[in-house]
Image (cartoon, rainbow, N blue to C red):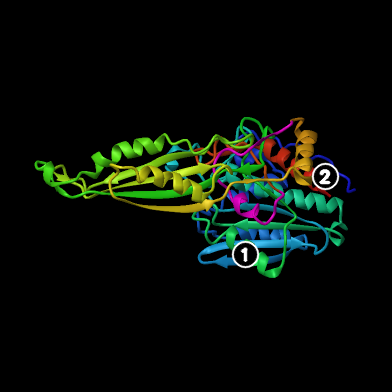
Amino acid sequence: MPKLAPKPALTNCSVSSKSEQGAVSPLIALAQALIKTPSITPKDLGCQEIIIKRLAALGFVIHPLRFGVVENFYARLGSRGKNFCFAGHTDVVAPGDSAGWRSEPFAAQIVDGQLWGRGACDMKGAIAAMVVAFEEFLAANPGFAQENSLSFLITGDEEGDAVDGTVRVLQWLEERGETLDYCLVGEPTSVKKLGDCLKNGRRGSINGVITFKGKQGHVAYPHLADNPIHSSAPVLAKLATVQFDQGNEHFPASSIQFTNISSGDGSSNVVPPTLEAQFNIRFSPENSPESLEEKIRSVLDEPGCPEYSLTMNLSGLPFLSQDGELRTALDKSINESLNLNPQGSTGGGTSDARFISQVCPQTMEFGLVGSSMHKLNEGVPLADLEELCEVYKRLLINVF
């Protein structure tokens, strides 16, 4: 059993000017370098190359994988034993109005003991912690790769359509006959305090559009028109109250949310010909895409409903990871490092774990507190980054 390297001391960087900050730890320096690269989906701008150079120096074999306009890469060290993979994304959402930020969104400044910048929380901070965890673990266990394998799967398409990212990398791995035995996705999963929550599953997600058809006409002559706004209103109200299922011990009940309703061209004297209603359904394993569509159509096909068309597109199936070696090791690592017992959760949005879990049943998500992700003034405490790195190192030891 490998021995755990000594826990690094937390860096005291609670002031704002560069001269006052002094030297930062390798972990914080790497996180800053990643944040300073404005890799807004799908532009990478060299962000992944920063990681690749660090992994190549450790002996990882690097496979750059560009699909469409998206940069991805897979890296592996070793070719034997169980393959433990860290997964994540380097792309970030746009920063929004920079005037609302306390410092420039991509300046990666340290102020009041926190690292600020777009991607600090979601999820460049976690990626930096993963890389440094690998570095320190391998320094303490130089012969590790002779019997076991470590890998890294990074995409630049998680915040976008997720078409040319992780899905394509997994297809590439399948074609090579390469498998993942354990995978930890470093998404921000903690709620109030680092270590209080991990994701052991996610709900499925479906996007849909219902187009109700009417008959255009003059508002002064409604008897000569058929207003789809009027005729669809009670139908939409009924759909909003459909109880698809009760959920189960791991998942909340499935629910539909209408996200946009549009009709007409803005004219005040024209009855529009159609109404379009967009919706999303987050669903539990108690339903399937087919059963959800059947229940929606059962309402749309009731007498009195206007003529309609329906399209539904699956963006991810629900999954629940096995309570196997990875969950046991992750719980133990969080408890040893943070003295907390994390709660398993399947709530929240989607992540690329929905794809990875289809080929790697032991897939978990664990990362930073997510309260600032996608917001103005995204940031993370320096102490949380250091502690997350410690959890990741202990996880490697506890898994192997």
Per the rendering, the mark at residue 12 is none
Bin the neighbour count of mark 2 within 10 Å (Cα to Cα): few under 14, some 14-19, many 20 and up: many
| Span colored in magenta | 341-362
Q: Quadrant of residue 96?
A: top left
Q: Which mark is residue 398?
A: 2
Which residue in the structure is indicated by mark 1? Answer: 171
> Which of the 4 quarters of the picture holds residue 108?
top right
Q: Nearer the viewer, residue 364 or 59?
A: 364
Q: Position of residue 30 (x, y in %)?
A: 66, 50
Magenta stretch: residue 359 in it? yes
- From the viewer's side, name the closer residue of 178 and 277: 277
Is 103 situated left or right of 229 in this image? right
The residue positioned 73% from the left and 38% from the top of the image is 387
Q: Nearer the viewer, residue 311 or 176?
A: 311
* Whole-number angstrom distance, CA of label 1 to CA of label 2: 29 Å
Say what amino acid the circle numbered 1 marks: Gln
Instruction: Indicate the position of residue 383 as horizontal and vertical percent values.
Output: 69, 35
Nearest to viewer (mark 1 / mark 2): 1
Residue 164 magenta-highlighted = no
